[in-house]
Image: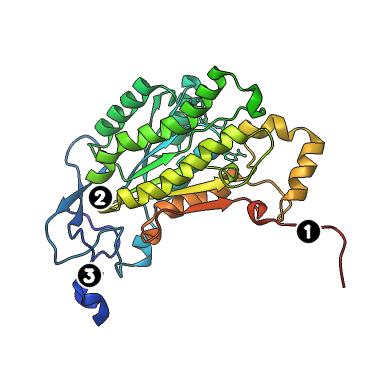
Amino acid sequence: MNLSIGNTATNSSNFPAIFQNPSFLPRNNSSITPKILSNSHPKTLIITASSNSSSNNNQNTPTNSSRDHRWSLSGMTALVTGGTRGIGLAIVEELLGFGAIVHTCARNEVELDNCLKSWENQGFNVSGSVCDVSSWEQREKLLDTVSSVFYGKLNILVNNVGTNIRKPIVHFTPQEYSTLMTTNFESVFHLSQLGHPLLKASGCGSIVFVSSVSGFVSLKSMSLQGATKGAINQLTRSLACEWAKDNIRSNAVAPWYIKTTMVEKVLSNEDYLEEVYSRTPLCRLGDPAEVSSLVAFLCLPASAYITGQIICVDGGMSVNGFYPKMDFQ
Ligand SMILES: NC(=O)c1ccc[n+]([C@@H]2O[C@H](COP(=O)([O-])OP(=O)(O)OC[C@H]3O[C@@H](n4cnc5c(N)ncnc54)[C@H](OP(=O)(O)O)[C@@H]3O)[C@@H](O)[C@H]2O)c1
């Protein structure tokens, strides 16, 4: 049984004359035919590639499909790391709201089970794995599970997990260095590598990294954490070029202070919080949903021509120059 997601009927003859030039047409002409599975997983759609080059409903190429289609993730499969709290939790729920089928992971089994139960009660299609993404073996196991849950095809990979150790560079121990590099950078490198065949097999893949403004500007006691995020930013750009031929997009979001458990302690200091406000043009903290909405946008067909970008979600912090209180007439 074939299912049409929105209005995907597009023919290259609908484009203005200039776009009829073969050099403007997508190089990968395989079309994407969503099919519903006949067996156990009733809500799962499998995206299969066919060689029919006369139609063009590939999500990462220009189409004149309907608005509904451009703003829907219906039937798409997604892996979001660290989906039980904070930004990751908001991302899982945002993607579900757009119709995606999600797998997530976290280390704490009780919290994961509670989240899975809550999503199930709301009628959402989410599965989960207990996994520490800083472990090479556990990452391999996670992707094996994802491959089997999603039948070898993954549309969306959100590399959300990251951690922080706040201290000056001179005080880092080898163990702390290793923890930060492994959790923040090695994990996203390896998960992307493991995810590549699944993203490619989906016919239209999208990776979103959760970076930080610390990857752009210097933040006190966060030089090493900032270096991991800077590395993520360059990986984002490089994968956009390296995997474009496989129709995989790669983008990142870079938040400033967002209200999550990770930053609860540091923000409980009122003087520090005051300094954060004074440095932030919008003069407030961000909400996880203000990050997840951008992540969802970067996964939607609506953003199909955006790749290699790192977008700050920071209330203007990263563009703030010198704005003294004193006014000049
Ligand atoms: N919050 C901010 O102000 C802010 C600002 C800039 C960037 N960011 C970035 O945003 C991302 C998410 O941060 P957050 O503030 O939402 O964090 P959070 O509130 O601490 O939530 C972290 C989530 O990731 C999971 N997790 C943590 N370490 C993990 C590991 N090693 N393996 C598997 N799962 C793990 C946690 O579950 P378990 O503990 O059960 O594993 C939880 O679900 C990070 O990359 C962070 O660098 C955050």
- Residue 102 sits above or below residue 51 on the image: above
Q: Amino acid at mark 1?
A: Tyr
Answer with left or right where residue 193 lies relative to residue 133.
left
Tell me residue 115's x, y (percent).
48, 30
What's the CA distance linking mark 1 and mark 2? 45 Å
Tell me residue 185's x, y (percent).
46, 33
Query: At 38% from the left edge and 48% from the top edge, which residue is drawn?
Result: 238
Q: Secondary structure at mark 2?
A: helix
Some atom of ligand 1 lies within 8 Å of the CB belonging to the residue at label 3: no
Q: Residue 318 versus residue 281: which sits nearer the camera?
A: 318
Count residues near mark 1 (Cα–Cα under 10 Å), then give few for <14, some for 14-19, many for 20+: few
Which label sits on residue 246? 2
Query: At 35% from the left edge and 38% from the top edge, which residue is drawn?
Result: 192
- Residue 32 sits above or below residue 171 on the image: below
**Quadrant for ligand 1?**
top right
Q: Secondary structure at mark 3?
A: helix
User: Does the CB distance between marks 3 and 1 fall below 8 Å?
Assistant: no
Which label sits on residue 23? 3
Query: At 61% from the left edge and 22% from the top edge, which residue is drawn?
Result: 172
- Residue 229 sits above or below residue 31 on the image: above
User: Does the CB distance between marks 3 and 2 fall below 8 Å?
Assistant: no
Which label sits on residue 323? 1
What's the CA distance linking mark 3 and mark 2? 18 Å
Q: Residue 16 versus residue 329: which sits nearer the camera?
A: 329
The C terminus - image quarter: bottom right
